[in-house]
């Protein structure tokens, strides 16, 4: 679903590149966690993959036919992004002048989905994220956690091939975070999409199939090492930095080994 090769990015004015020659892949039905210290470049990497920021070098191929995002002009890139990517922004970016239901329907409008389908798809997602009946409300009246769930529903509504999420559970209480994560995982499996999820939560990372750690020296890969099927074990030590133990293969949700 996603293949990144040789990706490099240096912000203008920065002394050294944030990353160079990055290589990563996310398979169909696979959920990959992206962790790393604050400021290491996780959001920039997600933005480059989504074509929201221009990378300096490399290939970014998305979807079954592996279209290269960075070989497209701005219009084609926006169309590709609208059709194939569901993005959950760190700061939500829910539009204040649209109702909750209208916000969630934006990707359907961009993709010209039949209007008759909008209501049902929006309502069913609102129920799944625990916001049944919130459709007519204005975003200004919602809490941070509720806005986060609206943003997640909006990222899923058009059934994208690739879900990019920047700390999607960062503003949620543990129970809601678990529900939202379960929804993301279920949708990815069901639609055979791929997902790359930036998180600071060890628990969230361990529910994924693989954990990628972004460091100033590049990406390191580990498999969640939880003892139980489903990788839902808790570890007391803080997350981030290099994996401290050798990777235990195939212990993520579904027990699959994906390189
Ligand atoms: N548009 C930009 N211009 C210049 N520097 C930026 C820009 N965006 C981010 N940075 C810098 O790049 C580094 C990585 O930022 P970011 O990708 O947000 O990291 P993370 O998401 O891992 O916390 C930070 O030092 C940040 O200040
Ligand atoms: Mg960030």
Image: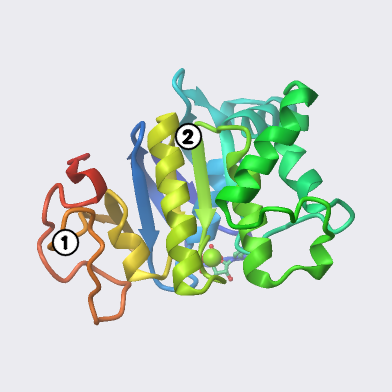
Q: Quarter-wise, where is residue 145 in the image?
A: bottom right
**Residue at the spot of label 2:** 60
| Residue 141 pos. (x, y %) | 81, 69
* Quadrant field for ligand 1: bottom right
Residue 7 lies left or right of residue 166; in this view the side is left
Q: Is residue 185 above or below residue 146?
A: above
**Badge number at residue 225:** 1
In the image, residue 78 above or below residue 256? above
Q: Is residue 51 left or right of residue 199?
A: right
Residue 176 placement (x, y as % from top left)? 50, 66
Residue furthest out toward the top:
65
**Which residue is more in the foreground, 18 or 27?**
27
Q: Quadrant of the N terminus?
A: top left
Q: Which quarter shows the C terminus?
A: top left
> What mark, if any, has residue 176 been given in the picture?
none
Measured from the top left, where is residue 112 in percent x and y? 76, 23
Where 174 sits versus 123, above or below?
A: below
130 vs 199, nearest the viewer: 130
- Residue 59 appears in the picture as rendered: yes
Q: Secondary structure at mark 1?
A: loop
Q: Is residue 91 visible?
A: no
Please tell me how crowded label 2 is: few (under 14), some (14-19), or many (20+) other residues with Cα within 10 Å: many
Residue found at x 34% / y 40%:
30
Distance from label 1 to label 2 (Cα)?
Answer: 29 Å
Residue at x 50% of width, y 52% of height = 45
């Amino acid at each position: 679903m996603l293949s990144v090769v040789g990706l490099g990015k240096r912000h203008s004015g920065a002394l050294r590149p944030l990353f160079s020659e990055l290589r990563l892949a996310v398979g169909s039905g696979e959920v990959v966690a992206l962790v790393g210290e604050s400021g290491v470049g996780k959001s920039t990497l997600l933005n480059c993959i989504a074509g929201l920021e221009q990378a300096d070098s490399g290939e970014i191929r998305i979807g079954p036919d592996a279209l290269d995002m960075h070989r497209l002009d701005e219009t084609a890139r926006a169309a590709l992004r609208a059709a194939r990517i569901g993005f959950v922004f760190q700061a939500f970016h829910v539009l204040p002048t649209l109702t909750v239901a209208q916000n969630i329907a934006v990707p359907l409008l961009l993709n010209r989905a039949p209007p008759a389908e909008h209501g049902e798809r929006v309502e069913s997602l609102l129920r799944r994220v625990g916001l049944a009946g919130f459709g007519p409300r204005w975003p200004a009246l919602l809490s941070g956690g509720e806005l986060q769930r609206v943003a997640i529903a909006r990222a899923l509504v058009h059934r994208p091939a690739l879900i990019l999420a920047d700390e999607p559970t960062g503003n949620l209480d543990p129970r809601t975070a678990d529900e939202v994560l379960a929804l993301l995982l279920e949708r990815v499996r069901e639609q055979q999409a791929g997902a790359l999820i930036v998180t600071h939560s060890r628990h969230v990372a361990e529910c994924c199939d693989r954990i990628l750690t972004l460091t100033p020296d590049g990406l390191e890969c580990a498999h969640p090492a939880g003892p139980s099927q489903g990788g839902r074990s808790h570890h007391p030590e803080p997350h981030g930095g290099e994996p401290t133990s050798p990777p235990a293969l195939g212990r993520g949700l579904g027990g699959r080994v994906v390189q």
